[in-house]
Image (cartoon, coloured by chain):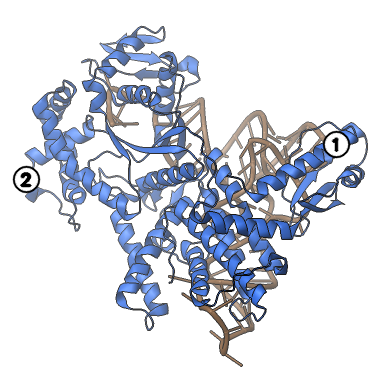
Chain colours: A blue, B brown
Amino acid sequence: MNYPFDDCKKEIISALQKALSALQYNCSIKLDTPLENLGDFAFPCFPLAPIAKKSPQVIALEISSKIEKHKWIDRVEAKGGYVNFFVNTSHLVSSTLDSVLSKKETYGHLSKKNKKVIIEHTSANPNGPLHVGRARNPIIGDTIVRIFRAAGYDVQSQFYLDDMGKQVAILAWGIHHIDGKDVVRSDYEKPDHENVGFYQAANKLMDEEETVAQQINDLIKKIEECDKDTLDMIHAAYAPVLEGINESLRRINITIDQYVPESLFVKDHSVESVIQKLKKTKYCSEENGAWYLDVESFGVSGRSTKFFFTRSDGTSLYATRDIAYHIWKATQADMLINVLGEDHKLESKQVEVALRLLGVQMLPQPIFYAFVSLPDGKMSTRCGRVVYLDELIDECIERAYMEVKKRRGTELSEPAMRKIAKIVGIGALRYNIIKVQPEKDIMFKWEEALNFEGNAVPFIQYAHARACSILAKAKDVCEKTNPVLLAHDSELRLVKQLARFPLVIDEACTSYRPHLIASYLFDTASLFNQFYRDCPVLSEENMMLRASRLAVVDAACIVLHNGLDLLGITAPKEM
RNA sequence: GGGCGUGUGGCCUAGUCCGGAUAGGGCACCGGCCUUCUAAGUCGGUGGUCGCGGGUUCGAAUCCCGCCACGUCCGCCA
């Protein structure tokens, strides 16, 4: 895929290289984006000043006089120590519109990389419904999946399924030993909500009664021995819960390509093999029968630097199985990405150390996110202090419905309003989470999560709906366009923004920053609204200008649609 | 005690990796714009020691050092 701005940047860089070598300046070229109206690309001359012993402004003047006019370069201007480049707008406008309108739903997509990427996300314990704290994981994960696909990678999303740990054992024990009457009933008729009470009750009993704790430990031992009846019982306990989790994920447009159960790596003895190999490394020691690596010399510090990979009874631990999982993943892909909560930072580092010791070349790239907390503390499934994802989804949709009804109640049918409410509500949820950098703490407040004004998804969806509305009404389409007529500042700024879309996808992908897409879309919608205000389309009497503006509307519509799709958000045709 | 992350107007946030031109936005607040393609829009205004203190630099929100606050971890849990 080749995009206008790629060509343009290439030409500017080569023109700069020529000018710099003619003046015998030697430096690397980094292009900045200048302030509004000062140009399209800027080359700062400050680093050259001490070398040339001249002022940056003098250097900028020298360079600008040496820049030749080309296809893309309209003019250059030396200002404040910068060489500012103005691109040939008519060329940029026509090639951008051509590019968007011909590529349509693939506009912005980058060329095929022929590389397979496994992106692991969510991987929640199947012991209860997803809560809002965890919701950041699937949303960040799925958005990264979509961005990497658009960037030309062959992507598979994986959910690492904990079917062997203590949490599922507690759940299974609870379902088998606790009377349903003694369990807090859920308002939701969904298997994850219906079963979480057993987990919570069993957890409480385990803390209170030694015998319960012992029974659960016996269960874990049997699981690890791959006792068939026990594994079947565990599976029967968590399978409905997992189905409930998946249903919640599907509600917010997320599907997982593959579920990889931990038990796989115990059954095929790769966990055992990991344990044997780790025991042979020189960082390994034993304490009361339990084995650990001392990871201090790998830059890990704290109260304890012991990384245990077996219990004293010889059974494996979560991290041990995670090592086996990563060894397997490394054979399945060219690149690995893990979306993890910040509480997994140490574990992730420990697994990385183990993988290095075992000679695994391909290490996973982790992406950590900070927790979403409630005003009165951290969310916890265990103590039942949570806002569940399903509750939040329902609230968002309901709130969106109230808004649609308030605005369009007299014009739209009930099913049409319900449909819009669902698109807006779910979009609002995903957008609110993805627009913030993953590493920032989020305090969950209902008022903010349900705020539909300003930098929120309805703003972007509304711009898309406005564009669709114009296109739907413009039946008498004049085929002939003339991009030279597009001279209004609002038109030019919008089209330049559309031209940037592929660059933004590339940046979001290579720097693992999905929130860049959200910022870009907000800016794009804002520029579209300014165009909408300044440049009437349907009432334009010059048919060629009208047709050209329609092309801009069409292109903006496509970019907003494609961008929202990267965030897993539907672009409504009306709202 | 140690590691990692975060700190930007009353609230939320971009920019920080890769130092550059008046620190962008949004919410709230004040004041304009609907005989004109859906006003979920738009224009203007009030409001900032970029946590604090040093340092490097022609230039620091951005890099370095120290400190403070918050989050998170330092389990034979996951």
* Frontmost residue, A407 versus A379: A407
Please state the chain letter of the residue tagged with numbered disc 1 in the rendered image.
A
Residue type at tag 2 = Asp
- Rendered position, A313 above or below A65: above
Residue for point 39% across, 82% down? A411
Alpha carbon of mark 2 to alpha carbon of mark 1: how far?
A: 81 Å
Residue A528 image position (x, y, % from top left): 59, 66
Q: Which residue is mark 2?
A: A179
Residue for point 57% across, 54% down? A520
Pointer 2 with pointer 1, Cβ within 8 A: no
**Along the horizontal axis of the image, is A452 left or right of A478?**
left
Residue A120 image position (x, y, % from top left): 38, 36
**Along the horizontal axis of the image, is B37 left or right of A169?**
right
Residue A17 image position (x, y, % from top left): 81, 37
Please state the chain letter of the residue tagged with numbered disc 2 in the rendered image.
A
- Rendered position, A570 above or below A270: below
Quarter of the picture holding the C terminus of chain A: bottom left
- Rendered position, A312 above or below B33: above
Q: Which mark is residue A20?
A: 1
Local SS, label 2: loop
Residue for point 78% across, 56% down? A38
**Along the horizontal axis of the image, is A124 left or right of A548?**
left
